[in-house]
Amino acid sequence: MSFITAPLTIAAIAAVLAALIAVVDKIVNNYGDCEIDINNGTKKLTVKGGEPLLGLLASEGIFLPSACGGRGSCGACKCQITSDVGQHLPTETPYLTDEEIAERIHLSCQIKVKADLAINIPDDLFNVKQFKAKVLSIKDLTYDIKEVLFDLGDEDIKFKAGMYIQIVVPPYKKVKGGTQRAYSMSSRPLDDHKVEVLIRLVPGGIATTYVHEQLKEGDTMDLVGPFGDFRRSETDATMVCVAGGSGMAPFKSILHEMIDSNITQRDLWYFFGARSLKDMFYMDEMRALEKANPWFHFIPALSEPQEEDNWKGDVGLITDVLDRYIKDKIGVETEMEGYLCGSPGMINACNNVMTGNGIALENIYYDKFA
């Protein structure tokens, strides 16, 4: 009978140990009610301790930016913690500068709430909401970029042109957990019951693959936002804007915001670069806006136009076209501000051209994405 009793004994011991671990875990991690003081008393929350700060804030309707859904891989969910939470964790430091560490900035997804906390966050984050949005339309702009328009129903979203929204991607196929990704809004701030985004397919990308292969008109998705500080300054300096691909999104929104606000006193030069004609989109819309608004100048350029493109516009790398226009058309003596949206490489290259033509580094604004 020993061949029967031995396994039963082992199973019983394992069950007892599992139960014991569960009890100990419950006791050890029972931190009770904890108070989170936000912005020196502006808002106070009472939460059950033992969970990450990011999730506890979200459960109370306060959303910090997080492109990875709290996995500690994007470094976006920063906040200042003025009460004692100990040393920074090794999982935080790769995403923090020395100045941020000195200022007690932490990644909220890595901070487990075990006692009362005092934190500081930007006031704008009090306006961030989670929306249940319905997909109104999905349009193919190019072979790899889709325009997705969401309806927020009775909800509205207050945002400045240039800000972004996070879409919450549910589990699908082999993707077990949900995740979030950030996309600049291309919609008009005035139309505050809708959100439009431009999503380029990234091979192997969880969110972009979901949107391109799974998402359908009529579906609902959770959106969280608005976030971001990329926006038009309030000066009268000439705006020199550069983008490629889905980097079109914030500039489309900024352009419509200026038209809706009747801001006609400052010139806006918009350089849009692509490899060939198949990568171009919104050409008719941009040309129509240029014709109707003399202060807006649209400069599309192809770096590798194909014979069948029959391209009559500017040719060359967008940095070369930008340099040429600043020198020959805009004038280096003009007061200018730079606005860039694209990959780090593109932004660095354009940044060199702009500073080389007299635009001060502090007057160049970025919306950088990988």
Image (cartoon, rainbow, N blue to C red):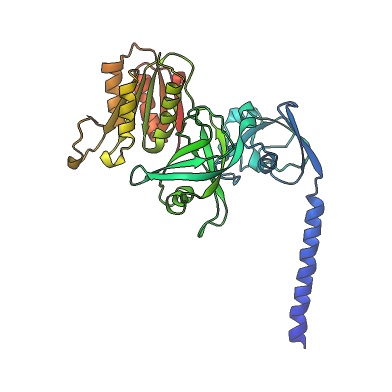
In this view, 121 is above or below 61: above
Horizontal placement of 46 versus 125: left or right? right
Which residue is at a point 66% across and 36% down the rendered structure image? 62
Quarter containing the N terminus: bottom right
Quarter containing the C terminus: top left
Pinpoint residue 19: horizontal percent, then vertical percent: 79, 64
Task: Answer whether residue 203 is visible to the viewer in this image.
Answer: yes
Relative depth, front residue between 94 and 239: 239
Horizontal placement of 256 versus 1: left or right? left
In the rendered image, the residue lying farthest to the front is 154
Res 246 quadrant in image: top left
Horizontal placement of 124 versus 6: left or right? left
Which residue is at a point 31% across and 25% down the rendered structure image? 322
In this view, 26 is above or below 34: below
Pinpoint residue 248: horizontal percent, then vertical percent: 39, 33
In the rendered image, the residue lying farthest to the top is 333
Task: Answer whether residue 89 is visible to the viewer in this image.
Answer: no
In the rendered image, the residue lying farthest to the bottom is 1
Relative depth, front residue between 193 and 359: 193
Horizontal placement of 131 versus 317: left or right? right
Res 198 quadrant in image: top left
Relative depth, front residue between 254 and 208: 254
Res 344 quadrant in image: top left
Pinpoint residue 193: horizontal percent, then vertical percent: 53, 35
Count of residue discs: 0
Pinpoint residue 147: horizontal percent, then vertical percent: 41, 41
Which residue is at a point 29% across and 30% down the rendered structure image? 300
